[in-house]
Amino acid sequence: MATKIRLKRLGKKHYAFYRVVVMDSRKARNGKTIEEIGIYDPNKQPSLIQIKSDRAQYWLGVGAQPTEAVFKLLNITGDWQKFKGLPGAEGTLKVAEEGPDAEARVAAAADEAQKLKAAKSEAEAKAKAEAEAAAAAESEEAPAEEAAEEKAE
């Protein structure tokens, strides 16, 4: 039996995510699988890639062929390099940052917006005060110039 390691599509329209599965190459895309060895969610930032390395190594070892998309995923996780004995077996997988939950991020963004708003209003007030000072200085110079013109006549 010719086995393939390929993606099984799940999710809604315009919001697909995939399972990395081992199946007979003659079966339909979402047909009966032999084994599920991972997941791939391209909708997250960075994309979520979780592959069971030991199971991927086993299936590659017994002759299962990865599709192009799965081959790229295996390169990212480093499983292909490990299977072939190439350098770079640690992979280039980016992991999402561990951080505060959604409520804390929203609160932090609101605080930042409040600080920016306060700084903007402060800058506007300063610019207005400078403009008034410049206008006052010009009005003081205007009578002095008129007086100088009258003396010259």
Image: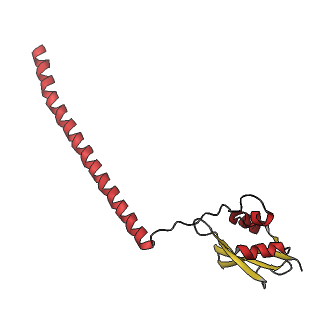
Report whether 62 appears left or right of 81: right
- The quarter in which the C terminus is drawn is top left
Identify the image quadrant of residue 128. Answer: top left
> Which residue is painted at 29% across and 48% down in the image?
123
Residue 64 appears anywhere in the view? no
Residue extending farthest right: 1
Q: Residue at x 78, y 78 (%)?
A: 22
Along the viewing direction, whichever of 66 and 11 lies nearer the viewer: 66
Please state which of residues 118 and 50 is positioned toward the viewer in this rendering. 50
Is 123 left or right of 76, judged from the image as shown?
A: left
Q: In this rendering, is residue 97 above or below 32?
A: above
- Residue 141 image offset from top left, x and y in percent: 16, 28
Residue at left offset 85%, top offset 75%: 62
Q: Which quarter of the figure has residue 103?
A: bottom left
Q: Position of residue 139 (x, y in %)?
A: 16, 33
Q: Estimate the x, y position of residue 4 in percent, counting from the top left.
A: 82, 75
Answer with the quarter of the image where residue 66 lies.
Answer: bottom right
